[in-house]
Image (cartoon, rainbow, N blue to C red):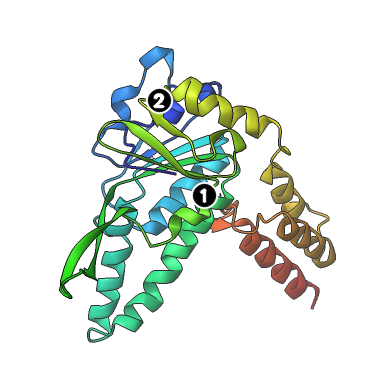
Amino acid sequence: MFPGMTDADVIIKGRAHKLPKRPPKTERGAASKYVGINGIQFDVLQMQRFDPRDLVKALAAAAQAGYEVVLVDSLSHFWKGTDGTLEQVDKAKSRYGGNSFAGWKEGTPMQNEMIDALLSFPGHVVVTMRSHTEWVLQENDRGRKEPVAMGMRAEQRKGVEYEFDVVGAMDVTNTLRILKSRCPALHNQVLERPDGSTDIAKPLLDWLNDGVAVTDPSAWIDAATAPDATAESLLATYRDVESRGALATPLLHPQTGEPTNLGDFIKERGTALKNAQR
């Protein structure tokens, strides 16, 4: 996750360029301006409205199509853009007489489902977010309240940065500060005008290549749709998916084409098989 980093150098110039890419691009056509630079080609999905459920659909379609890298530029729109989470909450509030609790009761599951789909995508995910200076009122030495800048905050749900493996913030001088990193080579790094390929993508790729390969979800889907599948075998498949933290993996339903997730699909199949046995 890279707040304030609209030029998605991590993917555009990074070593991950050997993989197919599909950025659900939202920054008014910005991503398409980089197609072909350094010979790198990628697909762009232009979105005009930013319902979180639409991003879940896009991720499910990308997973089914076999895309191994997805860039979302920017995730802020799905929070405060047209039809984003905040608008979904406002719409729900209006249906319940201005009840904020009722509004968030509908909006929070949409937001959570979107984040789960991002984190469970069977490939690499990079998101950018806009950021702004966060101010708080503090008492000065004269006993008066005054605004004090507390640093930069991403324009998304508070705390969303804790969900990602690597978090960086790019300022107006093109200095990238790594705020959080599970990649040891990037921990606490401050990079002035970083080269996306050598300074960011290479250490990330080296770290990723040293890890355990991601399980292809198609194997679980095949197990769930096999003609000889039973309720018992599906329960075993579900537990395997659960143990790997992949229940929220986005996918398009093999029969209906509607977006769902791996856990819900397996449960649906298991319920159908149980009902058929009665």
Q: Is residue 257 visible?
A: no
Give the image location of residue 213, x and y in percent.
72, 37
Q: At 50% from the left edge and 50% from the top edge, which residue is drawn?
A: 118
Quick check: 270 above or below 156? below
The local secondary structure at tag 2 comes to loop
Q: At 29% from the left edge and 76% from the top edge, which residue is drawn?
A: 92
Left or right: where 114 falls relative to 184: left
Q: At 55% from the left edge and 51% from the top edge, which residue is drawn?
A: 119
* Location of residue 26 by image quarter: top left
Q: Amino acid at mark 1?
A: Phe
Give the image location of residue 278, x and y in percent.
79, 78
Quick check: 28 above or below 162? above
Q: Nearer the viewer, residue 103 or 76?
A: 76
Quick check: 170 above or below 33? below
Q: Amino acid at mark 2?
A: Pro
Residue at the extreme top: 39
Q: Earlier in the sequence, mark 1 or mark 2?
A: 1
Quickly name the residue at label 1. 164
Label disc, if present, on residue 194 of the rendered structure: 2
Q: Nearer the viewer, residue 113 or 153?
A: 153
